[in-house]
Amino acid sequence: MNLLGLSYDKLMELDLGQPKYRNRQLFEGLHKKGQDYEQMSNLPQALREQLAEEYPLPVVTLKEAFVSKADNTRKLIFSLEDGNIIEAVLMHYRYGWTLCTPTQVGCAMGCSFCASTLQGLVRNLDRAELLSIFYKSSTYIGEISRIVLMGSGEPLHNYNEVVAYLRLLTDERGRNLSARHITLSTCGFVKEIERLATENLPITLTISLHAPNDELRRKIMPIADKVALEDLLNAAQNYQKATGRRVTIEYTLIKGFNDGLAHAVELSYRLKDRGFHVNLISVNPLEEASHQTPLRKNVEQFKKELEARQINVTIRRELGRDISGSCGQLRNRYVELEKRS
Ligand code: SF4
């Protein structure tokens, strides 16, 4: 049993052979302070040793941190107990640090512009590993006020662990992160979006759309073979109604593929009167794919075209490009280097 992944109620039920206030201290040590057992100086030494023996915590080790000279973005490389390597990113905004967290080792989704999927899905991260990544990142940088589930993996493909993780992270007796400061990005798990809307966990949902129609979307995102774009947008709109949280549409612009004015017009018809916000991103080219970054003026024109049709839109600021900007790139390079050395 992994104590880090236990809810408050389950941890309180655990018989440690101690008064119950020790269980509460343990929960606070794990979640409020992000401590290992040996750091919990308010617990008796014998209890700390017993916990370490009977309930070892997940071994998630911060191996290396890369700092962007351009914008102070930090890329953190962690190793897991089974030797897998994962990458998390810390981004600094005016309101503080945001953690971009992975939810799986690798990804099964096969989006053609994404480095995280090049080796397919290796395995899910469990709730304790996810929490450990958050707490270790926080120990490294200080307070983290927001998280985005946009790192390697499709979070809704790992639904149970991700939701349990978010419940623990937002527990007011623990880290007490506001659900409003959490953003989850999905490429299109419609049933899970519907389920998420019923969880009473009002997080922000982001849809990785990247194309204005099914035909174009299928060329870069295999999920489009299974999920129609209209069904996905309807699910997102229902989520927005149920939670009161405005949905964001992520649209990665690829030169000569989906960045034309006709694409912007078609996208605006698709999104008309839905109340979504659009985030435009310039693709970060991968060696393994032929996608090219769009011209800056085309990105601006695309934005203007959407605005002219009353679509709310921003261009996402690029962060950490000098330290392998796009999701999964740095982790893949790190793994390659480890293999060679
Ligand atoms: S973009 Fe997201 S869903 Fe698509 S392959 Fe990458 S990690 Fe997976």
Image (spheres, rainbow, N blue to C red):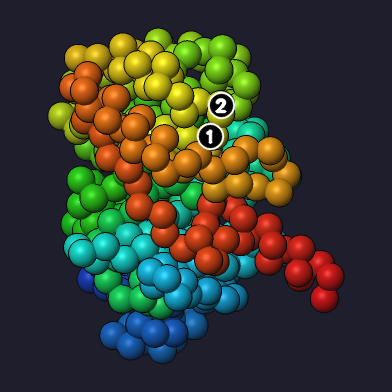
Residue 311, placed above or below residue 228: below
The answer to whether 120 appears left or right of 198 in the picture is: right
Q: Is residue 55 visible?
A: no
Query: Which numbered circle lies on residue 98?
Result: none
The answer to whether 135 appears left or right of 109 in the picture is: left
Residue 153, placed above or below residue 188: below
Are the residues tagged 2 and 1 within 8 Å (C-beta)? yes
The residue under label 2 is which amino acid type? Phe
- Report which residue position mark 1 lands on: 254
The answer to whether 114 appears left or right of 99 in the picture is: right
Residue 174, placed above or below residue 305: below
Which one is in front, 73 or 11? 73
- Report which residue position mark 2 lands on: 257
Rendered location of residue 89, percent (x, y): 45, 61
**What residue appears at the point 23 percent right and 50 percent down from the top-left corner?**
181
The residue under label 1 is which amino acid type? Ile
Quarter location, residue 238: top left
Figure quadrant, ligand 1:
top right
Quarter location, residue 30: bottom left
**What residue appears at the point 27 percent right and 30 percent down from the top-left corner?**
304
